[in-house]
Image: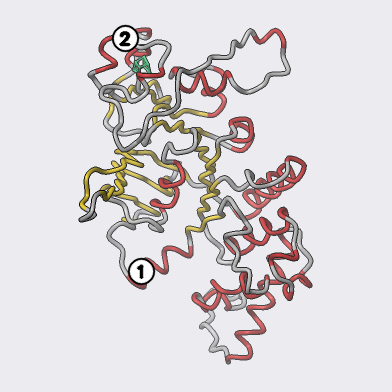
Amino acid sequence: DQILLHVRHLKKYFPKREGLLSRITRYTRAVDDVSFAIRKGETLGLVGESGCGKTTLGRTILRLIEPTSGDIFFAGRNIVTCRGPELRNLRRFMQIVFQDPFSSLNPRMTIGSIVEEGLIVHPDLLQEKKKDDPSAVPQRLSQAEQQRRRRELVAAILREVGLDPDMMTRYPHELSGGQRQRVSIARALVLRPDFVVLDEPLSALDVSIQSQIINLLVELREKRHLTYLFISHDLSVVEYLSDRVAVMYLGEIVELADSRRLYAEPLHPYTQALLSAIPTMDPKSGRQRIILEGDPPSPDNPPAGCRFHPRCPRRMDICRTEPPRILNLGGHYVRCHAVEKDLAGRGEFVEEMD
Ligand code: SF4
């Protein structure tokens, strides 16, 4: 399958400044040597507790946050080295929907202006599609025509996300939470992206509204052939939406696999603990809740060896000193000494997940 996004050895360290002179005393390792790939049309779920680095990872991929090091290839181009107009042009194809639709929408702008903004930056999107004549020369549009065309596109995308185009003149505070999230989705999709980072798009919404937004995201994915990175702490929603799932802990991906395989046969003790917390309707499932000791340690000062070792029910001596390598079991990637031991000799060690 064609790879759309390829992230290689990505790191994002935030300096911590302390003391009177505000010296950098240490670094928060929010994303620490993460590698993975997303195929065209695929949805990759990214899960983990809050503070594990998943939001920073999502934003760094789009270069809303500058990476410390590593590469991010999008459609074969390394966006880490892109500058100016080239970066602006690539950004059109990579959009984000934020968690909180209230704080991410400018309260002083109308819905129409919010959705229209991106089209002002990308006037090439205003060209009418000439179905019968692919060689047609782009038209030169007057200011008035451009404005008319922008309004048409905004009305069309609002309809597509289930909103009445008359809402264009309204302000975010006049809308419900679900409607605001639909506006955020319209703002991202009006630029006809290929790839969308969905950063906890449901967590600020009522449960009754969540399923409507999930259905909308699925519908839009099919219709527009979208590729998603779906960031969430809710593992049941991730299972429903994702083809593959990556599990993040303290800045690292500890397991990545096909969604069905990961949910049926989680290998990493952290994934097992996360999955054991999902309520099951099946009393015969035999699933026991695994309670982890303590909270996640700070990414300012991650534990030596396996970062999960202070909380891990399966830790061994080696876990305190040696970071586990990435074991590839036919596309099911995991980093854990205990799994290595259980599977003695199966799979191969690799430098990157993909
Ligand atoms: Fe637990 Fe050791 Fe595996 Fe880490 S490497 S998850 S501490 S068993």
Contact (Cβ within 8 Å) of mark 1 with mark 2: no
Q: Looking at the picture, how far across and down is residue 336, in whole percent?
A: 35, 18
Between 39 and 17, the residue placed more toward the observer is 17
**Colouring rule applied to residues:** secondary structure
- Label 1 C-beta lies within 8 Å of the nearest ligand 1 atom: no
Q: Looking at the picture, how far across and down is residue 42, in whole percent?
A: 53, 42
Rendered residue at 46%/17% (across/down): 293
Between 160 and 272, the residue placed more toward the observer is 272
The quarter of the picture showing ligand 1: top left
Query: Crowding near pointer 1: few (<14 within 10 Å), some, many (20+)?
Result: few
Q: Is residue 295 left or right of residue 31?
A: right
Q: Is residue 215 above or below residue 348?
A: below
Q: Amino acid at mark 2?
A: Met
Q: Amino acid at mark 1?
A: Glu
Q: CA distance from mark 1 to mark 2?
A: 49 Å
Disc marking residue 316: 2
Disc marking residue 157: none
Quarter-of-image position of residue 146? bottom right
Where the C terminus falls, by quadrant? Answer: top left
Q: Is residue 70 above or below residue 292?
A: below
Rendered residue at 76%/70% (across/down): 167
Query: Crowding near pointer 2: few (<14 within 10 Å), some, many (20+)?
Result: few
- Residue behind mark 1: 86
**Label 2 element class:** loop
Total marks placed = 2
**Label 1 element class:** helix
Rendered residue at 41%/31% (across/down): 249
- Label 2 C-beta lies within 8 Å of the nearest ligand 1 atom: yes
Where the N terminus falls, by quadrant? Answer: top left
